[in-house]
Image (spheres, coloured by chain):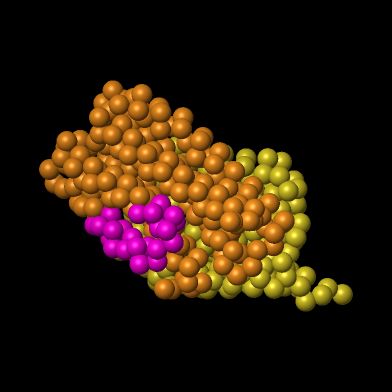
Chain colours: A orange, B yellow
Amino acid sequence: MRDAYHEDLDSLTDKLVEMTRLVRSAISRATTALLDADLPLAESVISHDEEIDRIFADVEESIYELMARQQPVAIDLRMVITALRMGTDLERMGDLAEHVAKVARLRHPESAIPPEIRSTILQMGQIAENLVTKAGACVASRDVEAAKELEADDDAMDRLHRRLFKEILHKDWKHGVEPAIDITLIGRYYERYADHAVRVAGDVIYLVTGSRTA
Amino acid sequence: MRDAYHEDLDSLTDKLVEMTRLVRSAISRATTALLDADLPLAESVISHDEEIDRIFADVEESIYELMARQQPVAIDLRMVITALRMGTDLERMGDLAEHVAKVARLRHPESAIPPEIRSTILQMGQIAENLVTKAGACVASRDVEAAKELEADDDAMDRLHRRLFKEILHKDWKHGVEPAIDITLIGRYYERYADHAVRVAGDVIYLVTGSRTA
């Protein structure tokens, strides 16, 4: 049987996995809201960000309590330190999904995304979801090999991000400056979301191996 | 006389203050490089980011050592935890300054900034410098009242950020889409830089008071 201390550490992992689930749902719904100009869906992403913030506050509090009470060492110490970093990244991913939803809300009833860009944005959304799903699985399983794979998926996001700029700067671009600004920001939000997911996986590698350069 | 343990904690503070000094210099030089289309200056910001990363790696290592060896409690525990958060924010501020410098480099020998936007960018750069200078002073002095002031300065950054969008979207904007994209990204970099500086000050408040909502 696990003692109370290790139950606390397990519960910390559970909360982080729950955060990955919520920020995955947030970016998924934000992408749909953006592409379909779906205002209620955008509003739901914006209002649900509080839930992510609340779980993070809970994670932080558990960490401070654990450290003060238990003075963890070695891998347990790495666990609480990386939990704090992961929580910070996941909380930020929630914010970025919220930013995407806010652009959808701002442009409603229009869609912020012209037809010729939709496929790129959809793919960016799918890679973002894929990255955070994998990151969540890595947090739960502490699978270092799986964690290393996220770098490659992030390269796909960077390629789409570059394609997005090419599309906005194409000579046939006829939508003017305002949609270009929206899409520049949206592209940045997806790219940063992906970066944070990769950092979460990197923290799993550090947690297991004790090294940042595995 | 301070014992070795407290000397270690003091040295942690010194390194964080040094980071604020370096990221202040980075954003200052990046702003000048951007406005003057100064390639060597842009290159120097880009190559010096490694130094910031190195100090942060050093901060991280000291923190893990301190925690493993000393098992700090109460305010000392808050010190190491907040040092990790501050270091993460400052490292990111270095990256953001580097991003600004990279736009300057990309557009050289042109300036990425059209004449009518220069004054807004200059002011954003000055507020960014001002914020990180104040944040550094707060880290050194642990002055909670001074730390609270940063929120108000950040409001000024948000106002300039909104003005920037207004300028790009003005009917007289004649520079087309590419400079609009550059300026959108640059605006975002300054705004995020300021947010991270405010977070550093927020961590000083937490460090001293033990509460995030002081």
Q: In terms of depth relative to the viewer, which is nearer, B93 or A69?
A: A69
Left or right of A70, for residue A154 = left
> For this view, does B151 lie left or right of residue B192?
right
Residue A104 vs residue A59: left or right? Answer: left
Residue A182 placement (x, y as % from top left): 31, 39
Q: Which of A147 and B124 is in front in this view?
A: A147
Q: Is there any visible trace of residue B107 in the rendered image?
A: no
Viewport quadrant of the C terminus of chain B? top right
State the residue lying farthest toward the left.
Answer: A172
Is residue B171 shown above or below B90?
A: above
Q: Is residue A152 above or below residue A172?
A: below
Please state which of residues B60 and B170 is positioned toward the viewer in this rendering. Answer: B60
Q: Pinpoint residue A7: horizontal percent, then vertical percent.
A: 59, 52
**Residue shown at 69% from the left, 73% from the top:** B69
Query: Does A57 lie within the magenta span?
Result: no
Q: Which residue does the image show at 17% across and 36% down from the upper left?
A: A115
Residue B116, compared with residue B99, is above or below; it is above
- Is residue B46 among what the camera can see? yes
**What type of secondary structure mainly makes up the magenta span?**
helix
Spot occupied by residue A103 in the image (x, y as percentages of width and height): 35, 34
**Mark count:** 0
Q: Which segment is the magenta one?
A: A134-159
Residue B73, quarter of picture:
bottom right
B194 vs B34, left or right, is right
Going 47% across and 36% down the picture, which residue do you hit?
Answer: A49
Residue A99 location, x and y as percent? 40, 38
